[in-house]
Image (tube, helix red, strand yellow):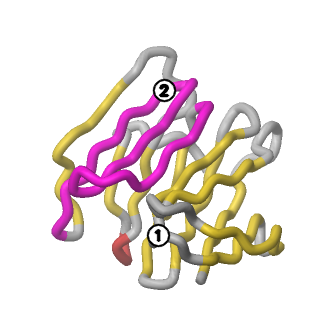
Amino acid sequence: MAVVEELLRGEDGGAISFGNHKLETKAKLVDFEFGGDLWKVKTYKTMTKLEKNGMFVYESVPGTSVNHFTETQDGISFTVEGSEDAQITVGLQDETEYEVFINSESIGKMRTNLGGKLNLSVELAEAGGVDVKIVK
């Protein structure tokens, strides 16, 4: 897996890839049209943030590179890579319980807050790509 040099790109099957955790300075791409939506990404080594149609979707501290990010009615899945362990926040449905899987292993059930945000930590240092799946 590698960084997303173009910052944000559409993939076959409706997935997107975004972020570049190796950038020394902030970079952003706005109004990227894909799948009938407008996407915006801001990324560099200390933070990566994704929005869809002006709404929060994903944020990581420090920055990450995300591949094959897919949203369904039941949750999201993606592969994430970074230089060090990351705190990731994703936007889902308000006050809903989800099960979180890291590399196909359940780390338990979590509930989103009133704003629909779910926070998780992912060990990325020396790990290469880590698969994350969050389902109702």
User: Mark 1 falls on what kind of element?
Assistant: loop
Q: Magenta residues, as a range?
A: 36-62
Q: Residue at x 68, y 63 (%)?
A: 131
Please determine whether, in this image, residue 33 is positioned above or below residue 135.
Answer: above
Q: Residues within 10 Å of mark 2 (few under 14, many from 20)?
A: many
Callout 1 amino acid: Asp
Counting from the top left corner in percent of width and height, residue 40 is at 28, 44
Residue at x 55%, y 61% (from the top left corner) = 113
Q: Is residue 108 left or right of residue 81?
A: right
- The three-letter code of the residue at mark 2 reads Tyr
Name the residue: 56% across, 25% down.
45
* Residue highlighted by disc 2: 44
- Check whether the beta carbons of the residues at disc 2 and disc 1 lie within 8 A of each other: no
Q: Position of residue 12 (x, y in %)?
A: 36, 72
Task: Examine the image and state in which quarter residue 21 appears.
Answer: top right
Residue linked to disc 1: 94
Gap between marks 2 and 1 measured at Cα = 29 Å
Residue 39 image position (x, y, % from top left):
26, 52
Name the image quarter holding the C terminus.
Answer: bottom right
Q: Which numbered disc covers residue 1? A: none
State whether the magenta stretch is mostly helix, strand or loop: strand
